[in-house]
Image: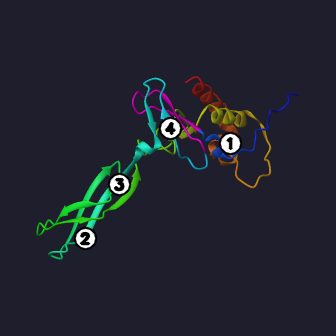
Amino acid sequence: MTELRRYKGQALPRQAYMTEFCVVCPKCNQKAKVTVENPYILNNAKLQCSNCKLIEKEEDLIRYNVIVKRNCLNCGKTFEVNIPNRKEKLTEMTVSCPNCNETKKYKPRNDKYKLSYNKESPRDPIFKLSLWFQCDIKGNTLWAYNRNHLSEINHYVSSKLREREDTSYSTMVEKLPTFIKVAKNRDAIIKAIEKLMKK
């Protein structure tokens, strides 16, 4: 009688795999990496591509919409001036009223936002770039942040006995989609992971 393979992976939360994201480079479409210092804060992120030498920092994504919305001190009519996509805040703006041409200095509102490359999932949570490790399986998307994440999914899927460890938090494998957990998809998922590992 053959011994059933037992899953004994570490009871790690998904965040434990979020220090590195393998992504599609926005410049050359080859594999690039997004790295972060702290997977629970996701700041100080850096994008690097060894193929085209692209380097970007998370702070490069920050932009401001600078807005002045006031009642003119001369004619009393309301006006609004908006300067989008600035890399730096403005502390003061000289604005002419479009109604009476009276020019005054105003303190603007600086609305901060972050640029992103992609709106579709699956993607990394910082630069919003498509994940390198992803493929379609029967109409569902299998994805992983990096090789370690993909390897742990493979370890879980290929095990026929899966023990749940008692934790006060949800582990990465507990949060896997149902299509990954069901036995009938096991062979297709293992083949897909093997193919992704060769990318």
Residue 63 percent coordinates (x, y) = 37, 50
Mark 2: few, some, or many residues within 10 Å (few <14, many ≥20)? Answer: some
Q: Secondary structure at mark 4?
A: strand
Q: Nearer the viewer, mark 2 or mark 3?
A: 3
Q: Is residue 106 left or right of residue 38?
A: left
| Number of the label disc, if any, that sits on residue 46 | 4
When the figure is inspected, residue 193 is found, relative to residue 83, above or below; the finding is: above
Residue 128 seen by the camera: no
When the figure is inspected, residue 129 is found, relative to residue 77, above or below; the finding is: above
Q: Secondary structure at mark 2?
A: strand
| Number of the label disc, if any, that sits on residue 89 | 3
Residue 77 percent coordinates (x, y) = 18, 74
C-alpha distance separating marks 2 and 3: 19 Å
**Residue, x 75% and y 44% (percent of image)?**
11
Residue linked to disc 2: 70
Residue type indicated by callout 3? Lys
Q: Residue furthest right?
A: 1
Q: Is residue 87 left or right of residue 130?
A: left
Q: Secondary structure at mark 1?
A: helix
Verify CB contact (< 8 Å) between mark 2 and mark 3: no
**Residue, x 15% and y 75% (percent of image)?**
74
Q: How many marks?
A: 4
Verify CB contact (< 8 Å) between mark 4 and mark 1: no
C-alpha distance separating marks 4 and 3: 23 Å
C-alpha distance separating marks 2 and 4: 39 Å
| Number of the label disc, if any, that sits on residue 181 | 1
C-alpha distance separating marks 1 and 3: 48 Å
Q: Earlier in the sequence, mark 1 or mark 3?
A: 3
Which quadrant of the view contains residue 163?
top right
**Residue, x 25% and y 60% (percent of image)?**
93
Residue type indicated by callout 1? Lys
Magenta range is 20-38
